[in-house]
Amino acid sequence: MSAPRRTKPAPSRRDFLKYAGAGAVCSVLPFGYSQVDTRWLSVEEEEIRLPLWDADGFRAVVLADVHANSAEQAEFAEIAAKAAVNEKPDVILIPGDHLNASDSRHLRNLKRFTDAFADAKCPVLATLGNHDYSSGVEKIVRAFHDSPVRLLRNEIAEVGGVSVAGLDDALYGKHRPEILSDDRLSKSLLTMLHEPDFVDELPRHVSLQVSGHSHGGQICLPFGVALHTPRGAQRYIDGFYPEAPIPVFVTRGVGTTGARYRLFCRPQVAVLTLRAA
């Protein structure tokens, strides 16, 4: 007597949408590089109103996830950095994922990126991301020492009446949200944390969390519908989320990882004007 045949379960609606979306992406790619947004930089201005904020009109430029691994990626990271400087903001924020490796070639690429901020008239502040930790993090940390970019690892910088905190990476580092409970901090408190979904761990008096990590999905359906985002960016993927436990802004980032292209998800330099609500 033959063994009973197993019937394959019907695919769920979620699976159907996932595979249909992947099929749509694959059908688009052969139509050429013009549909792939990898090097089509978008400098986007946004006005954000915050309940806990008294530095009205403060301007912060945000760029993240440069992944300056190849010469081509480093060149594009340099272009993004210069675009940030040209905005003449009060501060430039870079919340993590600078490199995927830390050999001499990658470190030269990182230097090319950080040197592009040499003419900045404002502080340029950065934190580490998960890829930095998987890439020989101490070499990357040392590379920032003599650069125009100040790396914050559970540290706070004061910029024009605003306290800017930089927390270590939440997945692989030792991030310490407790530093945000210092009574000496300004009411206007910005926090950089690479992975946006860890906003739940921050005290509620933080004015705004600025994050990257998601790449906005990197490979998306039309109108920016993300097919996949990494752990730590499942809830907050792209843009401003005023209804989060504290307000969160997530940039789509500049570079790529895994697949070396973007689709329906342009790389971004975000120019934020922060207003008192």
Image (tube, rainbow, N blue to C red):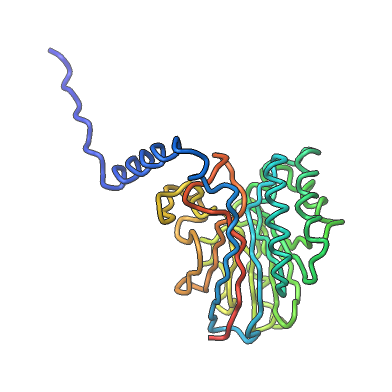
Residue 147 pos. (x, y %): 83, 57
- The answer to whether residue 91 is above or below residue 57 is above
Q: Residue furthest right?
A: 146
Q: Residue at x 20, y 26 (%)?
A: 6
* Residue in front for this viewpoint, 29 or 105: 29
Residue 225 pos. (x, y %): 41, 54
- The answer to whether residue 199 is above or below residue 105 is below
Q: Total label count? A: 0
Q: Residue at x 42, y 48 (%)?
A: 227
Q: Residue at x 48, y 74 (%)?
A: 242
> In the rendered image, which quarter is residue 43 located in?
bottom right
* Residue in front for this viewpoint, 129 or 174: 129
- 170 displayed left or right of 79: left
> In the rendered image, which quarter is residue 187 located in?
bottom right
Could you tell me which quadrant the N terminus lies in?
A: top left
* Residue in front for this viewpoint, 184 or 78: 78
Q: Residue furthest top?
A: 1
Q: Residue at x 45, y 48 (%)?
A: 228
Residue 70 pos. (x, y %): 70, 39
Q: Residue furthest left?
A: 1
- The answer to whether residue 60 is above or below residue 143 is below
Residue 264 pos. (x, y %): 47, 51
> In the rendered image, which quarter is residue 134 located in?
top right
* Residue in front for this viewpoint, 177 or 223: 223
- The answer to whether residue 261 is above or below residue 253 is above
- 15 displayed left or right of 119: left
